[in-house]
Amino acid sequence: MNRPVQKRFTITTLIILMLGGGIFLGFSLKKTLHFPVGGMASSENFDGAKAFKTTNPAKIQELKIYDSWKHYTTKEGLPSNKINTVRVDGNRVWIGTDKGLALMENGKIINVLKEEDGLAHHNVVTIDVSPMTGDVWIGTMSGLNRYSAGKFETFNQFNSGVPNDVIYQVYCIDKYVWLATGGGAGCYDTYSQQWKIFTEMNAPMHEPWTYGISGGDGKVWIAAWGGGIIEYELETAQMRDYIDPDGEMEIDLFPDDGLVHDITTGSSYENGILWVGTYFGMSRYDGTRWKGYFDHDSGLASNFINFTKAQGTAVWLCTDNGLSNFNGQTWVTYRPVEESTKGEVIITEGDKKRTLTTSTSMSNNYLWGMDYDEEYIWLATAKGLSRGEASGKLMAKATQ
Amino acid sequence: MNKLGRRILFLGIPLITVGIIFYSGHQWGVRHAKYITGGTPHPSNCISCHFYLDQDAQVAQMLDRAYVSPFKMLVSPDGKSLFVTAHESNEFVIVDLESGKVKTKIPVGKWPHSISVSRDGKTAYVSNHWSQSVSVIDIDSEKVIDTIEVGNGPSDLILDENNEFLYVNNSFAGNLSIININEGKEFRRIPTGNYPMGIAISPDGGKVFVTHRRAKPEGFRKSPITELVVVDTRYKRVTERKEIHSAHIMENIDLTPSGDLALFTLIRPKNLVPSTQIERGFMITEGIGIIETHAGGKVAQLLLDEPNRYFADPYDIVVAPDGEKAYVSHAGVDYVSVLDINEIRKILAENNQDELNRIANHLGMSSKFVIKRIQTGPNPKGLTISPDGQYVYIAERFADEVSVLDTRSMKIERHIDLEGPRTITQVRQGGRLFYNAGRTFQNQYSCSTCHPDGAEDGLTYDLTGTGRNLENTITLRELSNTSPFKWNGKNVSVYMQCGMRFSRFVTRTESFTPDELNALVAFIFQKLENPPNPFQLPNYELTEVQKRGKAIFERTKTNDGREIPEKDRCITCHPPPYFTDRSSANVGSGFETDTEEIFDTPKLNNIVDTAPYLHDGRAKTLEEIWTIYGGEDFHGYVNDMMKMELNDLIEYLRSIGPAHTYKFEESSIKEASNE
C-alpha cells in the first residue's frame, strides 16, 4: 500500500473511530446523566445488575444530585458539633449530639435539651418518631427517653424492661418501640407496657450486641454483632437469621451467597427491599436473592458503614468516608474535598465513573446518620449537621 | 342431803360450770376483742367478726343487697331522658324525666362508669370500668348492639363533634383509646398519663382534654405533679402536657361554652408535712383547677374549702349552658358547690401567674366565687345538667337516688328513685362511712381520699409526724385475711387500724363508734375487690414469659446451682392466694428515716396497679425493687439473674390477679388430685 492510500485509510479509520467513539460517549453520557435508568435495557450493561435483576425495574428510584450544602454547628446553636443522629419530623428536625438534643424548626435551632431537662444522657445516639402517637423516642448512651408534648419520660435498665442502657437504634412500628442495645434487642408494647428482650439466649445471635433495627410488612430486622440479621415476624413471633454463608471474616469468599458479613451495623427496609450495612460492605435482599456491594467493586463510599436508610427502592449509606446513594444500578457518592470547602460527587454505573465538583460540601466525611424530606437531606457528621439541597444546577451542567 | 339440796346441787353444779366457762370464755373474748381492736373498749360480739366480716362468709353474702349505686349521668339531647350508670348493679339505667321514673335498666359490663351520647340521642356509649370494653346501646330498642374492646380500666369517654371518633380514658393502663365509630373498633391508643380519669372536648372539637387521678412518678418525697393532657383531634396526638403542681385526683373536667376555660376538680395533698399537724392547718385541701385554653394561658388552682370548713373529695364538675355557673359535687361531705364563673374570670384577670400560684393555698378565695352550698344525699358523684340549664341532676351513690336541683331556686326540687333496695345493710352503711369525711378534723378527707375506689393515691405520707417512718399508701382491696396491717405490721386488725389510734393520730376527731367500725370493716372486707387483671390469662393460664417468671418466683436454686435458703425464696414470703405469709421481714429496704428495718410482707394481688413500691414508696417501678433497692440479695435472690430473667419475673408479678382466682386454682388442683 502506498503512503497516500495508507494515509487516507488511517484518516478514514480515525474518523470512523471518532464517530463511533462519539456516539458511544454520547450514549454513555445519556446513561450517566439520566438516572433513573429504569428504562435501560440496561441492567445488562452493569456488572452488578447482570447478577441481580430487580423484580420490578419500574421501581428504580430516581436519584437526585445534592449540590448545595448548608452547615449547622455550635455557631448556629447546636450543643456540639459531633452529631450522632438526625431525624426529620414534619417541619421539625431533631438533632442528637454528644452533648444533648437539639430541635430545629424552619432552619433555626429553637430548643436544646439536656440532662437537667430530663434527657436520660447527654450523648444522644438515635431518634425515632412514632407514626402512631407523634411521640419522639430518644436512645442515649444511658437510657431511653420518650418525649411527648414537651415532657421527658425515662426508661432504663433499672426502672423498666429496657435490655441495656446503651441504645444504638430506636425504631417505632405500629404500637411497638424496638431497640437495638448493647445488651440485646428490646421491644416495648406501648399498649400493655410489656417488654421483650432478644439476646443470644433466645434468638439466633452470637452476641447480645445489636446495632440496628428496621421493619416493615409485618417484620422486624435486627442487625446483630456477629449474628448477621435476625428476622422477626410480628404476628407469629417466629425468628430466623441471615448470616454470611461463607463465614469468612476477612473476605467475602463467595459473592452474593448471602450477607457480605456477620458483623452488621444496621438495616433498612422499604418497597420489599432489605438493605443491610456492615463494617465490610453492604448487602441488598429482595426477598429472593442477596447481592453484595463493596467499595472496591462499586460506587460505595466505604465498606465501613455506620448507618443505613432506605428511601423508596434506593438506599442511603453513611460511612466513614462519605455518603453513598444507590438505587440498585447507579451509585452517587458524596464526600468533601480535603482541605477545601468543595465537595465531589462521584457517579458510578458499573465500571463507569464520573466525578463532578460542587462548590460546597458536607461538613465532614465521617457520617453517623442521615434523614431526608422532600426537599433536603440531613447529615449527622463528626463535625456538624449538614443539609444538602438538590439545586438542579449540577444536573443541568452535567447534561450540557 | 335432802331432796332440795340434791336438786340445787344437781342444777347448781352445771350452772356454776356453765357460768365459769361462760365467764372465762367471755373474759377471753374480751381480751381477744381488746387485742384485735387495739385495746379500745369494743362491744363487738363473735358474730360481728366471724360471720359478717369474712369476705367469703355465706352469712355476709346472704345479707348483702343488690344496690344500684348511680355513678355518672347524662341528659339526652332532647332533655327527656336521663341516662345513668349503675356501678354496683352493672346496668345502664334510662330514666324518663317527665314522670321521674325508671324506664328501663339494661345490663352492661362490670362497673359501668361513664356515658357519651350521639348528637341525635339515638346511641349511647358506656365505658365498663372493669371489663375493658365500651357498650354501645341503641336507645330506641333499649338494647346493647355492640361491645367494643378498649384498654384497661375505661372510665370517662367523649364523642367528637361529628360522631366519628370516641375518646375513652383507660385509667389503669394510662392511655386513651380512640374508637372509630363507623368501623366499631379501636383506631389508635395513645399514652396520656398516670391514671387518666376526666375527659372533655373543646366546643370547636379541635382538642380533647384529659385529667389524671395520680401524680407523675416524680421520685421519693416530691410534691405531686399531675398532668392535664391535650390531644389534637385532627392528628390524634398529644400536643400539650400541662403540669398541675401540688395537686392530684383530678377526677373530672368540663369546659365553658366558649371553650376559653377548662375547669376540673382536684385535691391538694400536703403529704410532705406531718399528718399529725392536721388540727394546726390544712393537710388535704380540695378545689378546682382552671386553665385558660389559649396559647400561653394561665393555670390556676382555687380552693373550694373555707377556713375551718372543708369540702372533701370534689368529684364531678359541670358548667351551665350559659357559661355563668359551674357545679361541683363533693362526694366526701354530701354537698354541691355552685361557682360563679365570672368571678373566677375576674380572679384570673386580676392576678398574674405568680400571684395565682400563691393563692392556690388560700382558703379564703372560695368566698369570692362559691355562691351557694347545697346539701345532697350520701356520696354525690356524677352531675349532669339539662340542655336548657334549668336542672342539675346529682347522682347520690349511697342513696340509689338522683336528686334534681332547680338552678333558679337553687334548691333540690325532687328525688328520682332508682329502685334500689330500701334496706341499708351494715356493709352499705360502711360504704357511706368510707366515702365520708365526717370523721376527720373539719371534714378534710375521707378514707377514699387517700384510697380512691379502695385503692391507693400513690403518695407517701408522714403519718407519725416525726419525719420518720414514712408510709406509702397501700391498697385496701382484698384486705381480708391479710392481717397484720400497717407497714410495720403492728396493727393486728382493721379495727385497730381504723379505730381510736387512727383518730388519735390521723383524723384528730372522735373515733368511729363500735357499730360504725363494724360497718366500716365489713365494707372494706367485702366490697373493696380488685378489678380483673388483664395480664392474667383466661382460665388462669400463663404465657410462656409468665411461666418462666413463675419458675423464677418459685425457684430453689440460683443460676449457678447454689441452694436458695427457704426464707429467701419469693414463694416463701409471698404464697398464693394473697401472696403474703402475713409475717414481717427485713428485705434490706430500711432507710435512714426508718426506725425499724422489718416490714410487713405486702400482698401482691394486682401489684401491677399499685406503684410506687416498698414501704416508703421509694421504688417507682417493680424493677427498681431489685435493680436499685435489692441490695446484696436481701429481697430474694436476684443478683445472679440476667436482665431477661428479671423481666420474666416482672411479667409474672404483673400477671398476679385477684386472690379469688388463686383460691379457684387451689380448689381445682385439689379436685384434680382427688380424681
Image: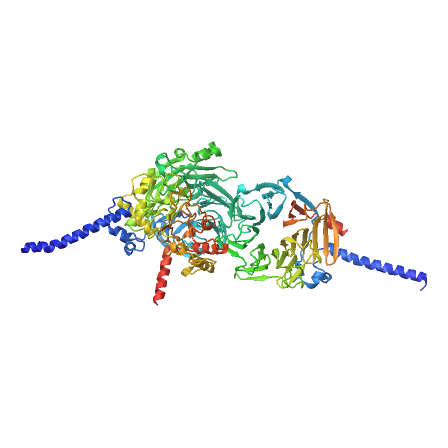
Of residues A364 and B464, the one nearer the viewer is B464
Location of residue A195 with respect to B406 vertically, above or below: below
Quadrant location, the N terminus of chain A: bottom right
Quadrant in the rendering for residue B263: top left
- Please indicate whether residue B448 sits to the left or right of residue A310 in the image: left
Quadrant in the rendering for residue A78: top right
- In the rendered image, is residue A215 in sight? yes
Q: Could you tell me residue B216's position as x and y percent?
A: 46, 44
Residue extending furthest toward the top: B350
Of residues B21 and B165, the one nearer the viewer is B21
- Identify the residue at image location x=37%, y=63%: B669
Q: Could you tell me residue A394's position as x and y percent?
A: 73, 49
Of residues B315 and B642, the one nearer the viewer is B642
Residue extending furthest toward the bottom: B675
Please count the marks in the image: 0
- In the rendered image, is residue B520 in sight? no
Residue extending furthest toward the left: B2
Q: Could you tell me residue B537's position as x and y percent?
A: 43, 59
Location of residue A218 with respect to B85 vertically, above or below: below
Q: Could you tell me residue B227's position as x and y percent?
A: 47, 43
- Please indicate whether residue A322 sits to the left or right of residue B279 in the image: right
> In the rendered view, how is the structure colored?
rainbow
Of residues A15 and A180, the one nearer the viewer is A180
- Identify the residue at image location x=72%, y=55%: A348
Residue extending furthest toward the front: B562
